[in-house]
Image (spheres, rainbow, N blue to C red):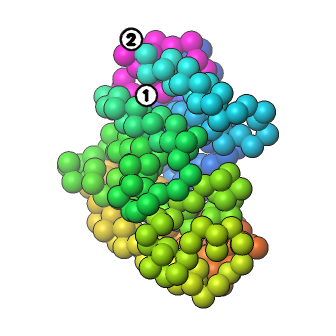
Amino acid sequence: MDELTAAGITDLQLRASYEECKRLNALHGKTYYLATLLLPKAKRPFVHALYGFARYADEIVDDLASTLTDAEKAAELKTWGDGVLSGLKNGDSNDQVGRALIDTVTRFNIPHEHFVAFLHSMTMDLTVTEYANYEALMEYVYGSAAVIGLEMVPILGALSQGAYEPAEKLGVAFQLANFIRDVGEDLDRGRVYLPQDELAQFGVDREMLEARKLTPEITAALKFQIERVRQLQREATPGILQLERSSRPCIEAASELYCGIVDEVEAIGYNIFNKRAKTSTARRMRVAGKAYVKAIAAR
């Protein structure tokens, strides 16, 4: 039985929408997609829908090939986002991605404010280029990452309300790990996501980052940020037991692979300006293989 049939999705238009979200997940979120395959078939389409929504919005904002100005991107994002939010309210959409999202949100009663927060953070990317402190950064990260963890919980299956806070923390950890790895790429987009006051503690400023030369000061600043990712991961891990057993292998694998980005930063000697820290195929397969055995046993 295919995933859509297993999930009870029979309408042809709706199936096409979910297939588009799955395509976006497979194309752009290879690690995320791999982890999704560890879920029971009946859960996977709904995770694809959440990813499709997030990815489509992100593409509007970060499409480097686009000839649109930031103001024009903001207008496009608002038009598309308002359309999806309106669809969430009235339960219908003509948007290829929005149709699957609305079906998922309705089935699992996911709060609409999570999607409002996400779109707010995407809009911030078009106007905010740096963050004075961690508290300011968290306004962005809540919408860009924490709410995705919160949206996932109803699909994964919460055994108690205790599943939500750890999911939020794990979402934040994933995002912060990406910030550490992507300092150079974010500079290309005119942004710095590492809090300015924390960088200053180690003698690092934006000019030093813009020089794209690894220094002892930058290394020390990165080590500080890496420890925060690991601490958030440690705090979030017990919460995985508050999810349905069939969902745990997926989240365990995602946690190891996404938070494991910081291991790869260490492995390249923190030289994030000249090398891309990425999880090797061997590690992906090792983690996925172990999780697959657990997933089969859980079913």
Helix, strand or loop for disc 1: helix
Position of residue 12 relative to residue 239, above or below, is above
Rendered location of residue 174, percent (x, y): 48, 60
Residue visible at 36% across and 67% down in the picture: 232
Residue visible at 42% across and 44% down in the picture: 143
Instruction: Report, in whole angstroms, how far the alpha carbon at label 1 lies from the one at label 2.
Output: 14 Å
Helix, strand or loop for disc 2: helix
- Quadrant of residue 171 within the rendered picture: bottom left
- Quadrant of residue 206 within the rendered picture: bottom right
Nearest to viewer (mark 1 / mark 2): 2
The main secondary structure of the magenta stretch is helix
Rendered location of residue 179, percent (x, y): 55, 62
Looking at the rendering, in which quadrant would you find the N terminus? top right
The residue segment tinted magenta is 87-107
Q: Is residue 168 visible?
A: yes
Frontmost residue, 290 versus 277: 277
Left or right relative to 295: residue 277: right
What residue did someone put label 2 on?
Answer: 90
Disc sitting over residue 196 in the figure: none
What residue did someone put label 1 on?
Answer: 104
Residue visible at 53% across and 47% down in the picture: 128
Position of residue 294 relative to residue 246, above or below, is below
Rendered location of residue 100, percent (x, y): 51, 24
Frontmost residue, 239 versus 295: 239
